[in-house]
Image (tube, helix red, strand yellow):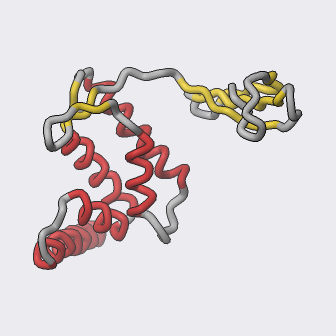
Amino acid sequence: MRCPFCRNMDDRVIDSRLSKDGDLIRRRRECAHCQRRFTTYERVEETLPLVIKKDGRRELFDRGKILTGLQKACEKRPISVTVLEKLIERIEQRLQESGEREVLSREIGEQIMLELQNLDEVAYVRFASVYRSFKDVNEFMSEVKELLEKGQKEKKEEKR
């Protein structure tokens, strides 16, 4: 493992711990050259399907791209990175369980929007506005109206 401080490749593991979920190993390392310590995380390499983009290109599934998009949608919202990472883990798990070798990017986007809709309505609208590429204000307003109607319907059901 390359030291993030001096770029040396020689280090030793000081401590290893399993995460609460059991799917990550946290390792504390010490650089043999500069003696500074740093943390690495190890996870099982999972076989995720290829993502078929709108233009037909195929790419490897990239959780970093999803996290970046979610962080933009959740900017200045009370949502931690940990919550976003759990959201991505649920989507990854569903993709693995599906057993599919390829998945449309649209399907992943829809899963993200469902998760966001339950998590934070503002983040949902932000993500949807980029994801669905609203062409004008009317399309945007239509999405917001649907969201409001759904919220009102749920409140009525809760009162019963």
Q: Position of residue 134 (x, y in %)?
A: 16, 67
Which residue is painted at 15% across and 78% down in the image? 137
**Residue 107 occupies quadrant:** top left
Which residue is painted at 51% across and 67% down in the image? 78
| Residue 2, placed above or below residue 160 | above
| Residue 19, placed above or below residue 105 | above
Q: Quadrant of the C terminus?
A: bottom left
Q: Position of residue 100 (x, y in %)?
A: 23, 23
Q: Nearer the viewer, residue 14 or 56?
A: 56
Which residue is painted at 28% across and 67% down in the image? 125
* Residue at the farthest right position: 35
Q: Is residue 160 at least partly visible in the picture? A: no
| Residue 45, placed above or below residue 84 | above
Q: Quadrant of the N terminus?
A: top right
**Residue 56 occupies quadrant:** top left
- Number of numbered discs visible in the structure rendering: 0
Q: Position of residue 83 (x, y in %)?
A: 50, 51
Q: Position of residue 51 (x, y in %)?
A: 25, 33
| Residue 81, placed above or below residue 2 | below
Which residue is painted at 28% across and 72% down in the image? 155
Q: Nearer the viewer, residue 155 or 12?
A: 12
